[in-house]
Amino acid sequence: MTGGVVAAVDLGATSGRVMLGYVDDGTLRLEQVARFPNGPVERPDGLHWDFTALYRHIVDGLAEAVRREPGIASIGIDSWAVDYGLVHGDELLAEPFHYRDERTARGVDAVHRSVPFAELYRRNGLQFLPFNTLYQYVADDRLTDAEVSLLIPDLVAFLLTGARAAERTNASTTGLVDVRTGGWDLDLAARLGIPASALPPLIDPGDAVGSLAGEARERIGAAIEVVAVGSHDTASAVVAVPLSTPDAAYISCGTWGLVGVELDEPVVSDEARAANFTNEGGVDGRVRFLHNVTGLWLLSEAVRTWEAEDGAAIDLPALLAEAAAVTGGVPLFDANDARLSAPGDMPARIASVIAESGSAVPATRPAFARTIVESIAQAFADAVATAAQLTGRDVDVIHIVGGGALNRLLCQATADRSGLPVLAGPVEATALGNVLVQARAHGWFGPDATLEDLRRAVAASTSPERYEPRS
Ligand code: LFR
């Protein structure tokens, strides 16, 4: 085995970063080069991403990465799914919308009028999420002005290299990819009035995208190649879950908690549809059979509201320690309640959901935080049980990766509520998965390395923390 260094651009809904990934004889190490905030911005026509700022941070971060490591072999880009930019010539036509913008509701009605959800599910295998790209396209007046539409990581790659392509794992979240063939479902697109020309050629993780060109090359300082990775952040995270048993479940926990198992074939049964389980495309044609649980978004939005009330920052680890010390029961609420998905006063909305169920609303912030964490853990445990039931697997361990792996209260509560051991970590699974797929493309894991070989490298380079279930 050999090694080298690559750069990973990893964009999350609350922050983005540029990392250097070092691979040396089957082991891995990450070094953070840049970290920048991200989040919804309110514009007159709705919620957007500040893409101009994001792109500037990415280019600055990559320039710094090259200063530190002139020998970078390639760059990989991943981000949250479903959102896109419309491109004409070399121009981005408009600032990308944020998936939490409410215009998607219009698209949902229009799509389901043309193609009933049961048929959609059979074709694309996706759980219903009101922001899946196809709903956004149907609500987007400007789609037909564009030559092509590019999902966020593909858009960044286009601005860096000029290449127009759609990486397949993320494309699977548009709702326009056939769950069986992995190709665009052009018949579905035509029925929804989505021009085939908007959908660029599909490529796979590990494929070369193009080399840095034009202004990006000048600003970053080298003609480095961009290599496609599992550009859906969850696909990259799943690559780096050090699955410890064949029946293990995983939770990729950040803003969302993506709870499920990895499969070789999709499950699009009526039961899976009713349980709202998705079949997203994984690296190497695997299937990410999972359910979206509203994860730490509930806590981060609550904290944001409290900070605005106080006019001061909140020490989250201290709040969580106080929450862990709360004795007696706290009420649970449905973490997936649709009324909790938009930004805005989260404590008040959660309080009204709890009050509606007849329970007493927690009176202190620590008790409130405890209610949030326990409710997320319950939703995690329920989703693991459902994944087991739908796939006939006897799940024996849950891996939690991503930022949520640092939340000890959440990891313990998930173990307790599921009755299963939890292995927490790595925290940086997404960046690791991004690095691993690039490293494999360079042959650093040997000629025929499988996902299992890549996961062995994660297991050899990280040590997950174990939480035993308490009765
Ligand atoms: C996680 C994630 C989820 C996707 C949601 C919206 O960051 O990518 O997998 O459902 O964000 O894009």
Image (tube, rainbow, N blue to C red):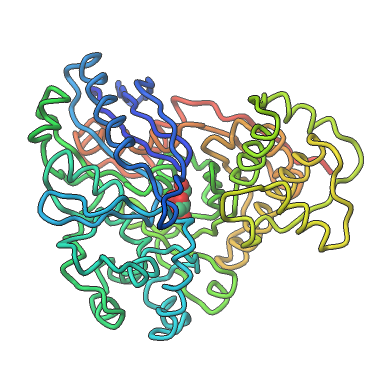
Query: Count the marks: how many?
Result: 0
Relative to 366, does residue 187 appear above or below in the rendering? below
**Residue most extreme to the right:** 328
Q: Is residue 30 visible?
A: yes
Residue shown at 36%/49% (left/top)?
232
Q: Is residue 248 visible?
A: no
Horizontal and vertical percent position of residue 324: 79, 32
Q: Nearer the viewer, residue 281 or 84?
A: 84
Residue shown at 68%/49% (left/top)?
376
Q: Nearer the viewer, residue 260 or 187?
A: 187
Q: Is residue 245 left or right of residue 149?
A: right
Relative to 206, does residue 9 appear above or below in the rendering? above
Horizontal and vertical percent position of residue 212: 12, 34
Q: Nearer the viewer, residue 161 or 29?
A: 161
Residue shown at 33%/52% (left/top)?
96
Relative to 159, does residue 66 appear above or below in the rendering? above
Relative to 189, does residue 140 appear above or below in the rendering? above
- Where does the N terminus fall, quadrant-wise? top left
Res 140 quadrant in image: bottom left
Horizontal and vertical percent position of residue 217: 11, 29
Residue shown at 54%/57% (left/top)?
292
Res 263 quadrant in image: bottom left
Horizontal and vertical percent position of residue 339: 64, 60
**Residue most extreme to the front:** 44
- Where does the C terminus fall, quadrant-wise? top right
Q: Nearer the viewer, residue 14 or 226?
A: 14
